[in-house]
Amino acid sequence: MQSIISKTFSGLLVAGLLAMPAQAQDAPAEERPSDGLQFFCGKTFDSASGGQIPTTLVWQPEKEGNVALIRWKSEYFGKDTQKRCQLVSAKFQKLWNSGQLNFITTGTVRKQPIVCGVASEGDTCSGQNQLFQLKPFADSSSLIAQLEGVFQGKVSSPVYESGGGSASKYLNMQSLLRNRAVVSRQAPNK
């Protein structure tokens, strides 16, 4: 199953993040009150390689620890995994702060499959809310199912990025954060 995720969720981001269209939003998002959540790029152990790999982590003050969201392994889009991890982690933080990361879903921008954060179920993906791009041949339904398992606490490891398609399922970000186990207690550098 992990290899499916590695193939499905890999190489996601960079091309789409670097070439996002400038689009106006319908209404400016209100800033989310500070809850102390901090998305950042750290490192976690990967048993397959036996080494540390870049991972999008979330510091959760109420848990006094970090939870892992995405382990970055693929260099499909030509960027190194550390750089992608940093770019995507910053996008998670920006959308969270603006109140636009209540749900995660998939969609298409410029004929490319993406994963995005949206404020409400029914909202669609755009260049403005894109978190990362998926490989053109990746199966976003599998990705969403994998993410849902993570969100529900049925899968203990974070998703491995390695790939997309289209799905209209919306995954609740609060559920993800509530159900993830702490992987480290070290607070991120500010």
Image: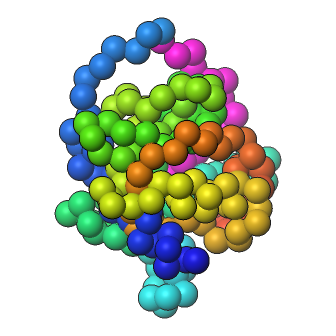
Give the magenta range. 28-41
6 displayed left or right of 80: right
Q: In which quarter of the image is residue 158?
A: bottom right
Q: Is residue 157 visible?
A: yes
Q: Which residue is drawn at 21% across and 39% down?
A: 19
Between 140 and 37, the one lying in front of the other is 140
Say how many tags the image has: 0
User: Which of 172/190 is in front?
Assistant: 172
Q: Is residue 186 above or below residue 122?
A: below
User: Within the magenta stretch, is there residue 30?
Assistant: yes
Q: Is residue 59 above or below residue 103?
A: below
* Image quadrant assignment for residue 12: bottom left
Query: Image quadrant of residue 81?
Result: bottom left
> Percent x, y for residue 57?
56, 57
Q: Is residue 118 above or below residue 30?
A: below
Q: Is 29 within the magenta?
A: yes
Is residue 55 visible in the rendered image? The answer is: no
**Percent coordinates x, y for residue 8 in the rendering:** 44, 65
- Give the prevailing secondary structure in the magenta stretch: loop
Q: Residue furthest top?
A: 27
